[in-house]
Amino acid sequence: MATRLRRNVTSPAADLTPRPGHPGHPGHPPRAGATTAVLPRERDAAIPIPTSRPLPYPDTRSQADPGSAPETAVRVGGLRRVFDGHVVLDGLDLTVASGEFVALLGRSGSGKSTLLRILGGFDAQVEGEVLVARERSVVFQEARLLPWRRILPNVTLGLTGRDAGERGRAALAEVGLAGRERSWPVTLSGGEAQRVALARALVREPELLMLDEPFGALDALTRIRMHALLQRLCRRHRPAVLFVTHDVDEAILLADRVIVLTDGRFSLDVPVDVPSPRRRTDPAFDRLRTALLAELGVDDLAEGTH
Amino acid sequence: MTDVAVTDVSTPRPARPDTHHTDGLPVASHASGVGTESADSVEAGERSRIVLVDPTGGRRRAGRRWHLPSEARRFLGPALLVAGWWAVTGLGLVSERSLASPVAVVDACRELLHSGDLTRGLGASLYRVGMGLAVGVAVGLVLAVVAGFFRAASDVVDSAMNFLRTIPVIALVPLIILWIGIGENAKIFLIAVGVAFPVYMNTFAAIRGVDARLVEAGQTFGLGRFGLIRHVIVPGAAPGFLVGLRWALGVAWLLLVFAEQVNTDSGIGYLLTQAQSWNRTDIIVLCLVIYGLLGLVSDGLVRLLERTLLSWRRGFDGT
């Protein structure tokens, strides 16, 4: 088993187009060069989260010297999460650079969603260092649109400023849903709803975009189109992406770097060196898939490949 | 319409080589064969003859059939009731002294309108119900929001409300009389107390039933406490609140009738007690009809509210 355990290593963006800095959304003020990292809890301090308690881990903000890692969107060190004596995350170290697309693979129950919930600020019962970009968005497995708000207010939910509506419209146009601003969420198909969720995440110009098996509930054809859309959007907005999935092919198709989470530890951390455009028939693709599947405990190639 | 079986009898299925025909029915030749399987084989053979039915069951609309509009159908029930009433009294099955005829009731209505008693009484009753509802709904709603949103408050408020809820409201009357007396305020208080509980119970349950994943999403996208209440909690709890409101309306009218029969000198209930002592069944029936209409109108108003507030829903509407 080719297990290369790497810690705190930021892999270079493998084969994506050169980064022209932040392209900037039309009408959006240019962001300061340095991505500021904050504790996930800080922004949500006033919001009642079901599990909200005082921070159980030391406030590490003072240790985060913004000058030392100006382009880091996620920095996690020695992260532990214990549920009722059961260690779910066991000393994780992870750094995600700005603009980097990281896929997080793992079997169900491996702790992927727990990690994402912690980074999203929904779980404060943790030990270790957790720092994430202040501007961040989440796309959940289900679209989670407010059924009592039309599409546009759903996209601009929580946005302030006069141009919020205009930015929302632009984001909807980007995901190909221009003209549906006044539709009700119940009238959307699964793929459309997930596109609205993408628009809602991207309209905030996030420095960090977290996706929790976002296409898991979509049919295969819609999924292919969503992959292309996500790639296009990420190339344009260049957020750091943390993409949780259990689909190996999806991870290889989209990511610059794939991390495998096994029983609460990162057991594999590899750059994706498959040249673009990535095809499933590429030998490099197949090699990586075989390695990842083996890491995930699927050794039977006859069943593991399609 | 009944199910339409489209089994085609005119063109029998091509007979298999091992079948022969008995009375026009294809029977597998091994049906009369040997072994214990023979009976099963016959059954299997019979079962394999697929009967095709039209899954729409004849409900297909070939050209739109004429339907009474749903609104009109809603009035059909009451109209039938009135017609039956008319028939019973008009045919002399019931004496005028026991049950006044519709005509007599209309006359009584005209008489009371002329004297001003009806308008005064209606005004007094509407005022009591209106005030009682306003106070009761406000109290129930505020308590529900507080208990629903703050966990510490819910432990205190919810257990208290659940305890008080079990006390029949009418049993409070002696205490209310001692506290507030027998005036107008006591009546409003009684209605308000009765109204607060259904509003509270339904709204609280609805707030707690708001999808936690939506709350989480709201937090992710930067909604603060107030934003969550405004965008997620309140609209999410609106259906439950409206159920509570309709329930509260029923309670309000019930308590009004009760309150107005004790020590009053105005209102529909007062007219009712007066009519009883004068032996005027026409006025009694008139008052009952008015109660019914008031209930119908208030329910209609809540329906209207539902239709505007819950237009985003695409639920099951009945067939």
Image (tube, coloured by chain):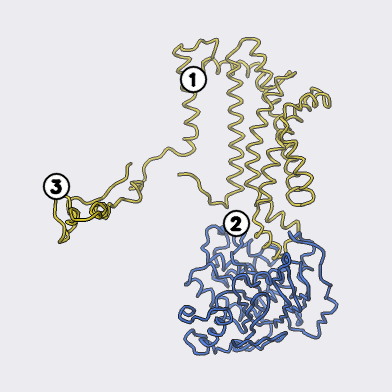
Q: Looking at the image, how many numbered discs can be counted on the residues?
A: 3
Residue contact between numbered discs 3 and 1, judged by CB atoms under 8 Å = no
Give me the C-alpha separation between circle 1 and circle 2.
47 Å
The lab-note entry on whether marks 1 and 2 share a chain reads no
**Residue at coordinates 75% horizontally, 56% vertically from top-left?**
B226
In which chain is the residue bearing label 1? B
Please identify, in this view, whether the residue under mark 3 or under mark 2 is nearer the observer.
Answer: 3
Q: Give the residue number, with chain letter if any, for mark 3.
A: B23
Q: Nearer the viewer, residue B236 or B133?
A: B236
**Residue at coordinates 30% horizontally, 50% vertically from top-left?**
B53
In which chain is the residue bearing label 2? A
Colour assignment, chain B? yellow
Residue A74 percent location from the top left of the image: 72, 78
The amino acid type found where label 2 is placed reads Pro
Residue contact between numbered discs 3 and 2, judged by CB atoms under 8 Å = no
**Residue at coordinates 49% horizontally, 23% vertically from top-left?**
B82
State left or right for residue B60 relative to residue B132.
left
Q: In which image quadrant can residue B171 be found?
A: top right
Residue contact between numbered discs 1 and 2, judged by CB atoms under 8 Å = no
Residue A292 percent location from the top left of the image: 57, 82
Q: Give the residue number, with chain letter if any, for mark 1.
A: B85
Above or below residue A148? Residue A78 is: below
State left or right for residue A283 relative to residue A170.
left
Q: Give the residue number, with chain letter if any, for mark 2.
A: A147
